[in-house]
Image (cartoon, rainbow, N blue to C red):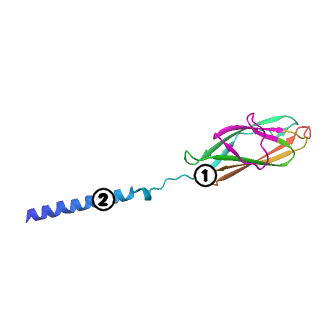
Amino acid sequence: MKNIINTAKIQLKCFLLLFVIGLFLQSCEKDDLEIQQNYPFKVSVMPVPKDIAKDEYVEIRIKIIPEGNFADTKYYLRYFQFEGAGKLQYYNTQPYFPNDIYPLYEKEFRLYYTSTSEVSQSFTVWFSDSFGNEEKIEFQFNNKKLNG
């Protein structure tokens, strides 16, 4: 009788072990794996001056901070100037055209805005990623001549 009980216990343990292994293997199937690729992000901008004179430039230090990391995520920039006139550019490249989309190759970089007018200036920069997430930053500069 003792042998029958011991055999039953061993069989039950083997059954439970096979059941657990089956669950583990099933959870590891390729179709069931979900790899997250889409991570929202925030944009950090260092403070910039409030006033700018014609032909003067302002350095804008920017950092894109994603909530997670997926190596193939691409980031883009576009801007639109809705008041005044000026040029926005990445380091010393050609100035950006309003509403065109430009790829960003780094998550931490500097833009340079150069005033070309003697009035207040305002523009918006949109940052987006390859998954459709988007952040908007607005910049406003007063003209130095207007403020004394």
The quarter of the picture where residue 32 lies is: bottom left
x and y percentages locating residue 134 in the rendered image:
67, 52
Does 20 sit left or right of 7 as displayed? Answer: right
Does 105 sit left or right of 117 as displayed? Answer: left
Residue depicted at x 13% and y 61%? 6
The quarter of the picture where residue 64 lies is: top right
Closer to the camera in the image, 136 or 131: 131
The residue beneath circle 2 is 20
| Secondary-structure class at tag 2 | helix
The residue beneath circle 1 is 40
Which stretch is magenta?
87-114
Instruction: Please name the amino acid that badge 2 sits on.
Output: Val
Residue 129 magenta: no
Q: Residue furthest left?
A: 1
Residue 97 magenta: yes
N-term-proximal mark, 1 vs 2: 2
Looking at the image, residue 134 lies above or below residue 5: above
Looking at the image, residue 9 lies above or below residue 146: below
x and y percentages locating residue 79 in the rendered image:
76, 48
Locate the N terminus and report the quarter of the image it occupies.
bottom left
Dot 2 alpha-carbon crowd within 10 angstroms: few under 14, some 14 to 19, many 20 or more: few
Residue depicted at x 26% and y 58%? 17
x and y percentages locating residue 88 in the rendered image:
78, 41
Instruction: Please name the amino acid that badge 1 sits on.
Output: Pro
Looking at the image, residue 140 lies above or below residue 28: above
